[in-house]
Amino acid sequence: MELEMNNLTKKFGDFTAVKQLNLSMTRGVYGLLGKNGAGKTTFMRMLCTLLTPTEGNILCDGRDIFKMEGEYRKLLGYLPQDFGFYPEFTVRDYLLYIASIKGLPPAVAKKRTKELLAAVGLEKYAGRKMKKLSGGMKRRAGIAQAMMNHPKILILDEPTAGLDPNERIRFRNLISEFSEDRLVLLSTHIVSDVEYIANDIWLMNEGEIVRQGTPKQITESMKQKVWECLVEKRAVPLLARQYKISNMKADTQGVQVRVIAGEKPAEYAKEAVPSLEDAFLYYFGEEAGDNHGIL
Amino acid sequence: MVFYEMKKIFSKSSSKAALVFLGFALCLIIYFAMGEVSYVNPEGEGTKGIAAARHLEKEKEKWKGTLTTERLQQVIRENNKVNQSPQAKSENTKENDQAFSRKQGFSDIRELLNKAFTGFQEYDYFRADTLTEEEAGQFYKKRTENLKAWLAEEGGGADQFTKTEKEFLVNQYKSLETPWYYESSDGFDAWFTWSPTICMLVVLTVGFLVSGIFSCEKRYRAASVYFASYHGRKKAVLAKIKAGVLTATLVYWGIMLLYSAVVLGCLGLQGSQCVIQTQFGKWKSFYAMTIGQEYAYILLGGYIGCLFFTLLTMLISSWSHSGTAAVIVPFALILAPSFLAETQIPFVDKILGLLPDQLLQVELVISHFSLYSLGGKIIGALPVLLVLYSVLCAGLLPVVYRIYRRKEVRE
């Protein structure tokens, strides 16, 4: 299974949301990182045939997905960022309905619904109306619907929004387990969501992929860009005006500051081991000197 | 899929409330329809409702049969006899009512005499009282003569119709087979009186129910998952259309049959074999049909109208993604003709006569002289409406399907 994007572009009037993307995806988990408004959702919607590209195409094993129609969507599982549901449906009814529009025969749908309810921990709430579920439970129901048809291509837009730490770990494990011999594209602005499970990470900004690679390759690209130093509290604002600061921790001796900079910010600064979060800040963080420079 | 689409419609609290409202309105209309039949007993006391219908039916039963000259003479004779009675001549209204009670059995035939022996656009309740038995033989002839006179009259039919249309109307009148068969049709009369109201209420309720069929996906932000699914742009869209049509069918026939069962069950089913001209308001109608056929046409027209408004609502819902707009447009289309009817703009009548609201009031369409020319052939509004809107319904189905299946999800 290979998804290939050629010069993929989407414009809304004068605004270009996605610019000339040339990408290829095979098996494994792809993490799409970018701040809000980077074009992630538009890109994913095109992958789900919800939006037609202004230019370029998306090929699935060499065939245009928009011409494949249902044949392509049969392979697809999608959890949108703004996951909506039918409030008066029970969780079971909702999943059975999704199974029906995904083309599962009723007997298979019942079995699969039962399996998924157990997998996402909603067995006890199967008869509860969707509108009565908590935010986390709704998200879990959303994950279950995306997986209903054993999709070969799973597209998850901000899947962990609203989940508590336990649920996020559970979700990560579920995706890891699921991604074997499948293609998973996971968009998020929460770095830790993809840090452990993504085989390949794409950093997206203003409709373009600005950096692409394995988590290791991306963190390696941050060598000599992440620094730590202990400064006096009053020196922090000055530092923030000059550099991006990814972390600060105050103690009795002063403030331990983690700085993202292409040069050593101070004589006494020490180079730190870069993380994916540092890379995220490096590529997408507010400019130094901005009021939001201090995270 | 259709099952779940129906569930989406009927699980909403607003839908449940709309159905409760419709049920309440139906009860109220049935109550009013029951009150349409009144009976005055020999003591001069008036009653209404089921018991009145039973008594009246018994009285009218004596007069059922073919309206031959002899039968009409018999009515004139009996009417005169009652008029000569002391109760009829009395100044006491109670005694007048007692006299009237003896006329109830032939009151429908008496009304037909009133209609036949006054001008086309006139009505005189006492005309039958002045008729002689000799005049009875002119009954059917007078109907056509009155029409001809009116069609020749300046300020009357002369300005309203072309020569071909006038010929068509006269031929329609002449072609109606005589003598007519008569029996009481009070049950149908009451049913017909309230059928436009119930039809409109059903259409508005169905419109409200189906207005969210397409727009709900956006409203609930469920469109992404829906369109990204295997059947999302084909079978699932068809399921929505099927659910809409099924909702319209179930609600329409459910309500209309319930209304029929109660009203006709209580007030009587007799009269279906009589021509519609034996009814008080249909004397002038040029359509050759029985009351039973009129009932069937009203049901059929109402159903086609209901389907048309349902599909129109779904079309707007699928195009605009707005349930509110989807409800408002058909609502306006039903109400607008009432305002436009007041205008004096030429040809407005012709246009108004073909608007879909007419299907919800077939009873009035049958009563009116709405004529259209098709390839040089004159035709009444009823067949035009039935064919036109059946074709439009069939045409709207693929349009709704195509519009919705191509929707993009932007929000």
Image (cartoon, coloured by chain):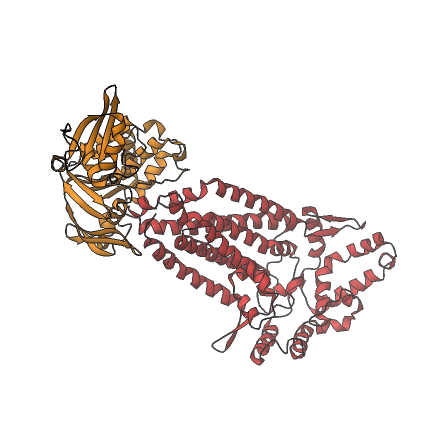
Chain colours: A orange, B red
Residue B347: which quarter of the image?
bottom right
Residue B196: which quarter of the image?
bottom right
In the picture, which quadrant includes the N terminus of chain B? top left
Q: Total marks drawn?
A: 0
Left of B165 or right of it: where is B315?
A: left
Let me know if residue A178 appears in the view.
Answer: no
Query: Is residue A31 or residue B203 the one in the foreground?
Result: A31
Let me know if residue B30 appears in the view.
Answer: yes
* Image height of B289 relative to B46, above or below: below
> Residue B134: x and y, percent?
77, 73
Left of A242 or right of it: where is B392?
A: right
Query: Is residue B102 or residue A153 the one in the foreground?
Result: A153
> Residue B388: x and y, percent?
46, 65
> Residue A25: x and y, percent?
15, 45
Left of B35 or right of it: where is B331?
A: left
Query: Is residue B344 or residue A244 the one in the foreground?
Result: A244
Left of A20 or right of it: where is A79?
A: right
* Image height of A40 relative to A226, above or below: below
> Residue A221: x and y, percent?
12, 38
Query: Is residue B351 or residue B286 the one in the foreground?
Result: B351
* Image height of A90 relative to B354, above or below: above
